[in-house]
Amino acid sequence: MSTIEQAPAGAPNTDDDAVPALALERVGVRFGGIRALHDVSFSVRPGEVLGLIGPNGAGKTTLFDAVSGVRVPDEGRVFLGGTDMTRANAVARARWGLRRTFQRVQTFGWLTVEDNVLTALEWEGGGGGMLADLVAFPTRRRREKRRRETVGAVLEECGLAAVRDESAGSLPIGLARMVEVARAIAADPKVLMLDEPSSGLDEAEAQRLGERIQALKAGGECAVVLVEHDVGFVMEHCDRIVVLDLGEVLATGPPAEIQQNAAVRAAYLGDA
């Protein structure tokens, strides 16, 4: 994998020379003769919240798949932290620090809420291999204790402490989505991609989700990319918005500018 020193085409103008956490350079995806994405370029800085909106079929989830490694783009390149990760698989991108949620809830239904979130930290292992498991090395116990403490703090932040011992499969949709969010943020991601995260949330849960997004922004190290049909939620929490239409970037800009864009209003926002 090659490393670049500057953001590729499509990067926003910034006041510093920081390498974007995520940058797309002329990404294209085809399904047979159907062009799902064409010439998509943009970047996201650490500590920035980017909204990705557009009508159904605009290519938003396809774009998420291309960024997260579920699908390799037919054209263009995907950079994470300045490194070309276009051909890297989803596991490599996750271990680099990219996390995502899905439009359809994907929890481990047979596990408790706590253990669902704990899975985000388990890939690092406990150190010492099988022998450490068999004899319960003190270092292994200490590492497990730290992980449980981290998970406990995340559950509190996401409003899930009261259901930590319940199976994830028994939860209503709103709480199940928050389990996904908690699992995604437990390992301090560098890029967090949220696909319709407010769908099914009640007002209090949506507020809590917004608070978590703003906390990540305030930390300054995680870039958040948000696909969301709740236009009000997007306008409130995003620094910039990219509008997709028919697989192409229709407009990019701050929320106030996007709301006033005539082409965007005609294609998507309407009277929203």
Image (spheres, rainbow, N blue to C red):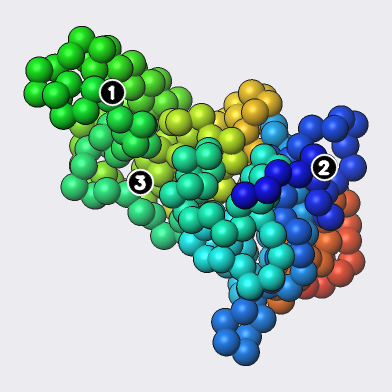
**N-terminal-most mark, 3 or 1:** 1
Residue at the left extreme of this rendering: 134
Q: Which quadrant of the figure contains the C terminus? A: bottom right
Q: Amino acid at mark 1?
A: Gly
Q: Position of residue 209 (x, y in %)?
A: 53, 37
Q: Which type of secondary structure does the marked residue at label 3 adopt?
A: helix
Query: What residue is drawn where x is 59% and y is 41%?
Result: 191
Regarding residue 92, the answer to whether it shows in the image is yes
Residue named by callout 2: 6
Task: Please state which of residues 29 and 210 is positioned toward the viewer in this rendering.
Answer: 29
Structural crowding at the residue carrying mark 3, measured as other residues with C-alpha within 10 Å and reported as few (<14), some (14–19) or many (≥20): many
Residue named by callout 3: 176
- 20 vs 71: above or below: above
Q: Quick check: marks 2 and 3 in contact, CB under 8 Å?
A: no
Task: Please state which of residues 204 and 123 is positioned toward the viewer in this rendering.
Answer: 123
- 206 vs 15: above or below: below
Q: Amino acid at mark 2?
A: Gln
Q: Position of residue 230 (x, y in %)?
A: 62, 54
Q: Which type of secondary structure does the marked residue at label 1 adopt?
A: loop
Query: What residue is drawn where x is 19% and y is 47%?
Result: 110
Left or right: residue 120 versus residue 64 is left
Regarding residue 207, the answer to whether it shows in the image is no
Left or right: residue 203 versus residue 165 is right
Residue named by callout 1: 127
